[in-house]
């Protein structure tokens, strides 16, 4: 095995043997890889503080292409102190870890890493975790091969007179194809399309009315349930959290 330095974020961790862990790390260079952190659960281990979920840094590893790599050390790029100290933010971040973990099982597209890392960085910078999560969710649909029609009517392709959206139709619906769907505010149409196309790294302002976000939330949830086959335990927790905390 050769020594490599890879940029990555830990998606999940699993205890292994009496003192070690296996980390699943999404990397910029190799996609998702498994890494053994030997002895990291020992109180004196230098790997103890860098062998957990959401550790973001440069990982020095004995890289094994078709097996379990071994962790040597980590240079942390961002400790996400702000994110980790806020229940709402850390809950959304944990959900994104689970989502990206499952999506990366189905594709090796390297751009997933940029979407994920940039969303966490913006969350750390106090941008709305709720909106950032919706943006990531929409972008992940493309990697899953079930992107909704957001450039025109899902029925006829017409790019004008879009008046609503429908998960069963697969996206936007124009005035000519409208049947009994509830007509939505034009801001819903505009923001949903913006969410899909926006470069997260370039976001400088992010504020949307709660009634608009509620409709977008509902559409994305219905779309995921209908087309992706993914079951994410942390999503249910987010729903419960949103019932008892102010919206972000």
Image: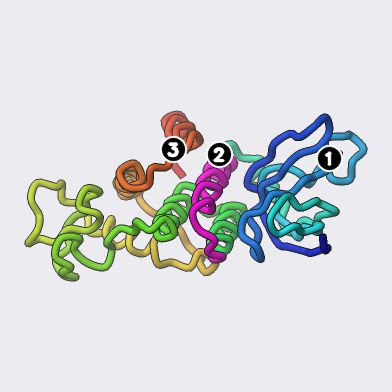
Quote the CA–CA distance across marks 1 and 3: 30 Å
Local packing at callout 2 (Cα closer than 10 Å; few below 14, some 14-19, many 20+) is: some
Depth-wise, is mark 2 or mark 1 nearer the camera?
A: 1
**Disc nearer the start of the sequence (1/3):** 1
Left or right of 38? Residue 90 is left
Badge 1 marks a residue whose secondary structure is loop
Instruction: Tell me the quarter of the picture where residue 207 sits.
Output: bottom left
Q: Main secondary structure of the magenta part?
A: helix
The Cα atoms of the two marked residues, 2 and 1, are separated by: 24 Å
Instruction: Specify whether 199 is left or right of 90.
Output: left
Give the residue displayed 83% in from the left and 41% down from the top.
48
Question: In the image, what residue occupies the spot 38% across and 58% down?
Answer: 145
Per the rendering, the mark at residue 231 is 3
Spot occupied by residue 115 in the image (x, y as percentages of width and height): 53, 61
Give residue 94's position: percent from left, percent from top: 57, 42
Which numbered dot is residue 146?
Answer: none
Is the C-beta separation of discs 2 and 3 under 8 Å? no
- The correct choice, above or below, for 89 with respect to 236 in the image is below
The N terminus lies in quadrant: bottom right
Question: At 35% from the left edge and 50% from the top edge, which residue is drawn?
Answer: 209
In this rendering, the count of numbered labels is 3
Q: What element carries label 3?
A: loop
Q: What element carries label 2?
A: helix
Label 3 neighbour load within 10 Å: few <14, some 14-19, many 20+: few
- What residue sits right under mark 2 in the picture? 91
Q: What stretch is highlighted in magenta?
A: 89-111
- Vertically, is 210 above or below 63? above
């Amino acid at each position: 095995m050769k020594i490599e330095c890879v940029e990555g974020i830990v998606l999940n961790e699993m205890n292994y043997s009496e003192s070690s862990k296996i980390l699943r790390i999404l990397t910029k260079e190799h996609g998702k890889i498994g890494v053994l952190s030997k002895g990291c659960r020992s109180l004196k281990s230098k790997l103890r503080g860098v062998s957990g979920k959401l550790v973001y840094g440069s990982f020095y590893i004995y890289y094994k292409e078709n097996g379990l790599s071994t962790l040597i050390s980590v240079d942390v790029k961002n400790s996400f102190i702000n994110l980790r100290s806020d229940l709402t933010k850390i809950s959304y971040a944990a959900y994104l870890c689970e989502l990206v973990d499952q999506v990366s099982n189905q594709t090796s597209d390297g751009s997933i890493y940029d979407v994920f890392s940039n969303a966490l960085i913006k969350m750390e910078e106090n941008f709305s975790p709720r909106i950032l999560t919706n943006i990531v969710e929409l972008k992940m649909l493309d990697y899953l091969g079930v992107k909704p029609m957001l450039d025109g009517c899902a029925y006829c392709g017409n790019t004008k007179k879009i008046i609503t959206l429908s998960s069963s139709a697969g996206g936007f619906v124009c005035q000519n194809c409208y049947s009994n769907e509830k007509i939505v505010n034009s801001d819903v149409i505009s923001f949903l399309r913006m969410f899909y196309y926006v470069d997260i790294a370039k976001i400088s302002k992010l504020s949307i009315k709660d009634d608009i976000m509620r409709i977008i939330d509902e559409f994305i949830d219905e779309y995921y349930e209908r087309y992706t086959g993914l079951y994410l335990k942390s999503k249910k927790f987010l729903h419960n959290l949103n019932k008892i905390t102010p919206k972000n």
